[in-house]
Amino acid sequence: MTDSAWETLSEQAVAAASAVYFLALLCHLVEWAARLGSTRKAATKELAGAGGPATVEAADGDAPAEVSEKAARRMEFCGRLGLLLTILAAACHLVGLVGRGMAADPNRVPWGNMYEFTLSGTFVMVLAYLVLYKRFRLAWMAPLVLVVVLTCLMVAVIWLWDPVAPLTEALNSYWLVIHVVSAVIATGAFTLGGILSVVYLAKLRKPDATTGWRVHVPTLEALDRISYRIHAFAFPVWTFAVLITGPIWAHEAWSSYWNWDPKEVWAFITWVVYAGYLHARATAGWKGRNAAWIALVGLVTLWYSFIGVNFFNSNTQHGYASGAPAPVVERVAVSPVDR
Amino acid sequence: MSTTEQAPRKAPDTGRRPGELGLVEMLRWAWRQLTSMRTALVLLLLLALAAVPGSIVPQEGVDSLKTSSWKDAHPQLTPIYEKLGLFDVYSSPWFAAVYLLLMVSLVGCILPRTRVYWRALRAQPPRAPRNLLRLPDHATYTTDEEPEAVLARAREVLRGKRYRLRAADDGDAGDAVSSERGYLREAGNLLFHLSIIVVLVGFAMGSLFGYKGGVITVVGQGFSNIGNQYDEFKPGTLFDESQMEPFSFDITKFDVDWIMDGPRAGMAQKFVSHLEYVEEPGAKPKSYDLRVNHPLAIGDTEIFLIGHGYAPVITVRDGNGDVTYSGPTVFLPEDQTFRSFGVVKAGDAQPEGIGLQGLLFPSFYMTPDGDPATLVGDDLNPLISFNVWKGDPNPSGAPQSVYMLDTGSMEQLKRADGVPYRLDLQPGETARLPDGLGSVTFERMATWNKLQISQTPGKELALAGVVLALLGLLGSLFIRPRRVWVRARRGDGGTLVEVAALDRSGGGDTETLVADLVAELRRTPGDDPGTGDDSDAGPDSGPDSGPDSAGSAREKDA
């Protein structure tokens, strides 16, 4: 296959993945609708049973049971179908990534610019969701994950897209593989953890709700715990990416392992905020709500350091994503005086 | 906080008002506040916040050119920002204050915790609580076995799982086994925090004892590692020039690949600088191919290839025909097509000084309106387009940039129609200047390399610190500190066994832990696991787990 064929394949695969993710989202929405519907019916039935005479309840007894059985079957079917479609979409997504790497000459890892990074990051997120699906019983968060993934893919395709291009000289290093892959993994995991924190905070507003979606998400304690576990996984990975491989690479490419470049600054800020989150979970008065808020602040700084820095801080050396690479000599202009 | 209880109660004796603190108490109170987790947390968030301005306001140490142009553009804000240290955030006193306070808080937190940990490390696992069923995760079952046999097996099983056991004759009244594991979690935690200090020390060493210098060297020329050979030189506060290693090198050749098609057409790639170097005068010459991402290390000094550009060789003859300027002239690239800007100052020319300001087009073509432009950065067809000034380029004699022509006391040459005089030269061409000023020759193209040369002492220490921090972090996040207790007592229907576990990190796996342990304990060596007694092995399912305890366990989950 030629490089341009690979590129086309990649783009088609990403489009296909987005379409299938969307179908999966629809399935999960139907599933959720059925789930919410069944509880509402159960609730009304309970009310009727409590108020009305016993005979009425007995006469009515069969119909709702049948309905809820039907709903349950639909719920299960749609849930399974949604999961299946998500797996299928993830496979397409992977093809899109591989195609991107194969389209470059020479072949390389598919995270050389922001479009590719977003593609990889969302893939990691889906992968993490699928891997943890059983262990943490994540079925309930399917619509949220899919909405976030679809949004990110849309942003990537519309605003971040870049043609396949060879790497700039500074990026041409095996540290690109190690440094960026760890950043991608951490970003995907942090985002997943952040979604859980959002749900936690939303549930916290009405922890004792007996109707509505809140009933169907895990308990506050479980949400907090799963969120913590995912953050606790992502934090060391982020540490590795930002404070170990990043400086090593910076030292090789730019001669100084820490330059206070805006990207570095924001990666550091993100690290500090998530460190704060881990501490907050162990501090009286900060557990729960405040910790979850800190996690969300961390998520914002994380995504700012990834996307925002490239758009708002023009003086970053990490500007590879903005298309044309800045000439490397820019710093030369620090004019030496007449010798 | 609760420390206000420290206020002396015998106010009349000391002559102090109630609630007033003595100096020592005040200090102790301040120390407690500073080293409390809450303060550490606030300081952490403050550190994150304090780092933000440095990414918004251009920083002197990061990009001084951008900083000075920002200052020019904001004359009103500049003095305020300067007072606040906003152009040098990361070495400003207030930023230092935040991280130093954080470090003090960290040390103040680590020291007592190390003491506590040291004690815990040598202590026995705590005695079994009187009522194991009060713990959130517990299970009970009855068996025909003797309590002693159950406890002996519990010891064996727990030891096999690398639990530390409390000595049998110590406390436990002979009816229980107490065990604990996961001691390394706190060790990891302490290691993580200590390593941060190591990293800071390494970082400080780099900025105190290191230096960073930049030099532009024309290919074909050489460099000796002496301070005055540098174009820019930033020594650390405690840097001593005797640290500089006496190496020297020549750049013999420079190769660069130009991408001619595709989305990155025009981009330079795979540039290699071929160096011949000696580590000290008289040493055997060695060669090295210097590339981006592949620095050359000589002793403690490292040499990096940062950039490249063109240095056309230009000769200026004055009105008398004497050579007043000759040599490779560094032109700075303005964009990625390597259209470059440079100046020539021949102040000594007679009868009048000559100043040239030119744009270099490495692969030029003429646009329809007669102005040159360049296709790519490769020097396939170079052209320099000069404007010419006459007069003294440096009347004051003060040091000035070699990349800028100060035309303040010069006069630009104009054509008769008032359009500035323009001189287009290709390699090998000479042009005579009007007014008998002399002539300019573009001899040939040459290239230059921008090299960064630096010493970063402490970088290995910082790296070791951060790797240790990561190890500690992994330990503190993933090692589970657990306590497990097994109690066996003779009851009415046989031996009643209670198993309970506590995860001190707040992790939630203790339920399965207890279930697994019960399953293992019930697998009597000679017994068929399927048969035996009537109760189930699952948690909370024993006949004697009272309704209240089961209820409380559930409540915790809800």
Image (cartoon, coloured by chain):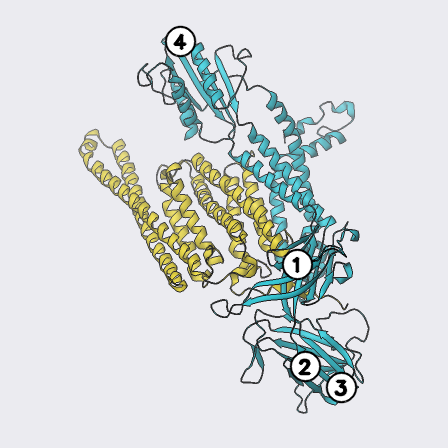
Alpha-carbon span between mark 3 and mark 2: 14 Å
Could you tell me which residue is drawn at 45 percent across and 40 percent down?
A200
Contact, mark 2 vs mark 4 (Cβ under 8 Å): no
Could you tell me which residue is drawn at 62 percent across and 56 percent down?
A254
User: Viewer-proximal residue, B127 or B371?
Assistant: B371
Mark 1 or mark 2: whose residue is earlier in sequence: 1
Mark drawn on residue B287: 1
**Residue B102, visible in the rendered structure:** no
Residue A98 % position (x, y): 41, 55
Chain with cyan colouring: B
Q: Does dot 3 land on a helix, a strand or a loop?
A: loop
Q: Nearer the viewer, mark 4 or mark 3?
A: 3
Crowd rating for badge 3 (residues with CA inside 10 Å; few <14, some 14–19, many 20+): many
Dot 4: chain letter = B
Alpha-carbon span between mark 4 and mark 1: 86 Å
Chain with yellow colouring: A
User: Viewer-proximal residue, A268 or A49?
Assistant: A268
Q: Which residue position holds label 4?
A: B491
Q: Which residue position holds label 3?
A: B437
Q: Which residue position holds label 2?
A: B387
Residue B128 % position (x, y): 51, 17
Residue B528 % position (x, y): 32, 16
Marks 3/1 same chain = yes
Mark 3 or mark 2: whose residue is earlier in sequence: 2
Q: Nearer the viewer, mark 3 or mark 1?
A: 1
| Three-letter residue code for mark 4 | Gly
Alpha-carbon span between mark 4 and mark 3: 118 Å
Residue B37, image quadrant = top right
